[in-house]
Image (cartoon, grey):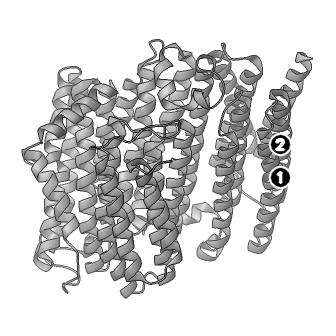
């Protein structure tokens, strides 16, 4: 096999994981982690210039190129944030060097698993990769070994495994549907072969398969009512992992769903997958928006906000059509960047204040101005206020829906507004008002956070035309 | 000859559903583990039969994994964990045995109705297998929902997974079955090691998952 960008995005993290598992010392391993993530990102970017060849197992097309670029970019910035975050955790003795070694190896293993899920041209291989990504995150969520962390890891483990199990059943059913048409053996699981012949698959079998896939991968996307693992896993794990979970892993599961949606859309006899996705997305968005109000824990607050936004994204893709798909893609990108930036801020804030409880922090813009205003900017972005990127994508989702199903658009807008209220209510207590909690300056690394927010700000004002045409192509591809 | 092949496959898959029902009403952990070993044994026989019928020697590997790993190693390991944790007495179930069994019967009926209706075009052997497999999966889910004990939840999950392996082997010529069953074994090994290494009992004083709720950040 020749070495190209495709093998690069898989081999670099895999090799780095093996290397990091063997190397002691925190400083060196943290920089190796950052360098490996940077190299992976470089390989991903190079795909836009020299497209690697797809084979029977691995595939590169317009759709997954965007996902890979986003995954590796956020993976890289999170590695930078993680280096400063973990340094602090070692200083205060919350993590021992042995666990840090394990953590870094797992971080790269997660990167490998996510990239593998994205480039897999085989629905079985994709399933194995998503299972692997789940396992590595479970291990990292439980890394603090506290009551809460173990409980969160256990819950994530059990719910994630059930989801993964249902997704496998769906995958088997897709194979059963494909087998009479494509033929026995490997070919009937190869994505490119499936999509060519999807029109003549048994529609009833595909219907049932999609229900299982929606429930299975939907659990991993964090759709209500299957979201129960998500807030716990975000709140109790290390903050870099919260950023990667919200920013990336949810997207990877969503990617799997989108692939199967494309398959179903080609079969005229099968149910339309859109209404199912619209319903689940809308329920998630509304439910999570109301659940923002009673939050007492800062990381849980933003975890629920992730459920809300994944709901909006699934809603947009469920509506389908070039405009809604475009809006969904844009929203997914903006959400990944903004939410990880928020978690970067939240990680440093929790370290500075020594707690995650909202009641014990306050007046952050006075005690830690840079972090405080960074968080304010992040929340303004995620709540969907102009002129930031999320405003534009949410606006597109709502307006494109208005033309086709006004009532759904109204419901969605209600969800977004309720969510906005909840976020600002909580933000008010955290960022403004009387300063509470420790005010000692903290060593924080601001570059990743502000880099993400800058991209989101620029995207809200001006989208480069190459990006727009690229997204439009994918939106057409998604149907 | 075809009738005989079909009957044996049918009987083995049907027995798997039956053993799933037997697990539902076990209220002692030792007994539950023994029944689970039986479950894995029946699965191994069923997979081996499919391997023979389909002339697919690689499926014997999956059968071997089921036999050695799930019917022997895992139950023994869980047995020792139970002894070490001293929780062999009894396990509570949510709701009574009667209602649970009734729900189980309902789930089996549901999966028969759904699967037999949608798989009219598939060959009969795979079709029956798939319907039984879905029953086993749903019964496994039911068991996970009705148990509060971490060990019996894991047993429920493993029986669910047995149903998936049954479905995968029933789908003629499906690739990656061996790889997937290995991936699942790794997952299960992780869970079992997790129970042991995390020493849930030490941390929480009980493996009753209800008690874990107490520690959730927001409920203090």
Q: Residue at x 26, y 56 (%)?
A: A339
Q: Residue at x 46, y 66 (%)?
A: A16
Who comes first in sequence, dot 2 or dot 1?
2
- A381 vs A129, nearest the viewer: A129
Classify mark 1: helix, strand or loop: helix
Q: Quadrant of residue B58?
A: top right
B147 lies left or right of A242: right
- B108 vs A69, nearest the viewer: A69
Disc 2 to disc 1, C-alpha distance: 9 Å
Q: Position of residue A180 (x, y in %)?
A: 63, 17
Q: Quadrant of the C terminus of chain B?
A: bottom left
Q: Check disc 1 and report the residue beneath it.
A: B71
- B211 vs A325, nearest the viewer: A325
Which class describes the residues within 10 Å of circle 1: few (<14), some (14-19), or many (20+)? many
Q: Check disc 2 and report the residue beneath it.
A: B44
Q: Cβ–Cβ below 8 Å for labels 2 and 1?
A: yes
Classify mark 2: helix, strand or loop: helix
Q: Which mark is residue B23?
A: none
Q: Position of residue A69 (x, y in %)?
A: 31, 49
Q: Position of residue A76 (x, y in %)?
A: 31, 62
Is residue B102 among what the camera can see? no
């Amino acid at each position: 096999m020749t070495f190209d960008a495709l093998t690069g995005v898989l081999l670099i993290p895999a090799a780095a994981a093996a290397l990091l598992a063997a190397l002691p010392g925190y400083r060196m391993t943290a920089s190796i982690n950052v360098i490996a993530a940077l190299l992976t990102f470089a390989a991903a970017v190079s795909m836009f210039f020299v497209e690697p060849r797809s084979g029977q197992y691995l595939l590169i097309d317009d759709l997954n190129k965007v996902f890979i670029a986003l995954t590796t970019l956020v993976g890289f910035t999170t590695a930078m944030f993680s280096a400063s975050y973990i340094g602090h955790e070692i200083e205060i003795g919350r993590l021992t060097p042995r666990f840090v070694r394990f953590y870094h190896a797992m971080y790269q293993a997660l990167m490998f698993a996510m990239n593998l899920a994205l480039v897999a041209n085989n629905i079985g291989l994709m399933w194995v990769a998503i299972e692997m990504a789940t396992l590595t995150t479970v291990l990292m969520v439980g890394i603090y070994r506290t009551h809460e962390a173990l409980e969160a890891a256990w819950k994530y483990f059990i719910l994630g495994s059930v989801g993964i199990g249902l997704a496998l059943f769906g995958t088997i059913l897709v194979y059963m549907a494909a087998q009479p048409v494509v033929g026995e053996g490997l070919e009937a699981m190869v994505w490119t072969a499936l999509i060519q012949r999807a029109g003549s698959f048994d529609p009833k079998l595909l219907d049932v398969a999609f229900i299982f896939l929606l429930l299975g991968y939907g659990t991993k996307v964090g759709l209500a009512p299957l979201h129960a693992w998500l807030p716990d896993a975000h709140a109790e794990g290390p903050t870099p992992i919260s950023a990667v979970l919200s920013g990336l892993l949810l997207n990877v599961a969503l990617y799997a769903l989108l692939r199967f949606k494309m398959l179903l859309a080609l079969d005229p006899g099968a149910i339309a997958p859109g209404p199912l996705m619209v319903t689940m997305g809308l329920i998630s968005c509304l439910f999570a928006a109301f659940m923002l109000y009673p939050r007492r824990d800062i990381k849980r607050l933003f975890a629920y906000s992730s459920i809300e936004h994944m709901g909006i994204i699934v809603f947009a893709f469920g509506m389908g059509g070039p405009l809604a798909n475009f809006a969904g893609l844009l929203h997914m990108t903006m959400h990944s960047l903004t939410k990880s930036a928020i978690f970067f801020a939240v990680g440093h804030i929790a370290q500075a204040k020594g707690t995650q409880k909202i009641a014990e922090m306050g007046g952050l813009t006075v005690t830690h101005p840079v972090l405080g205003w960074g968080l304010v900017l992040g929340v303004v972005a995620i709540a969907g206020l102009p002129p930031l990127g999320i405003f534009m994508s949410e606006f597109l989702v709502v307006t494109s829906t208005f033309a086709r199903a006004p009532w759904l658009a109204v419901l969605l807008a209600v969800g977004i507004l309720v969510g906005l209220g909840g976020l600002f209510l909580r933000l008010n207590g955290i960022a403004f008002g009387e300063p509470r909690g420790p005010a000692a300056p903290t060593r924080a690394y601001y570059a990743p956070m502000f880099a993400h927010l800058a991209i989101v700000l620029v995207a809200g004002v001006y989208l480069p035309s190459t990006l727009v045409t690229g997204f439009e192509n994918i939106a057409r591809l998604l149907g | 000859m075809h009738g005989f092949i079909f009957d044996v496959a049918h009987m083995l898959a049907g027995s798997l559903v039956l053993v799933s029902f037997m697990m539902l009403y076990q209220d002692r952990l030792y007994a539950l583990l023994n029944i689970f070993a039986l479950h894995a044994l029946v699965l191994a026989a069923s997979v081996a039969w499919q391997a023979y019928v389909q002339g697919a020697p690689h499926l014997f590997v999956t059968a071997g994994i089921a036999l050695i790993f799930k019917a022997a190693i895992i139950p023994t390991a869980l047995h020792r964990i139970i002894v070490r944790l001293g929780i062999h007495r009894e396990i509570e179930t949510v709701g009574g045995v009667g209602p649970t069994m009734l729900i189980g019967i309902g789930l089996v009926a549901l999966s028969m109705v759904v699967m037999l209706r949608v798989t009219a075009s598939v060959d009969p052997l795979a079709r029956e297998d798939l319907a039984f497999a879905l029953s086993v999966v749903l019964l496994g889910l039911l068991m996970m929902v009705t148990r509060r004990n971490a060990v019996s939840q894991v047993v429920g999950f493993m029986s669910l997974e047995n149903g998936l392996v049954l479905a995968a082997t029933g789908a003629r010529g499906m690739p990656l079955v061996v790889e997937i069953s290995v991936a699942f074994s790794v997952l299960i090994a992780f869970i079992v090691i997790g129970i042991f290494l995390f020493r849930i009992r030490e941390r929480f004083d009980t493996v009753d998952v209800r008690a874990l709720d107490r520690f959730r950040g927001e409920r203090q």
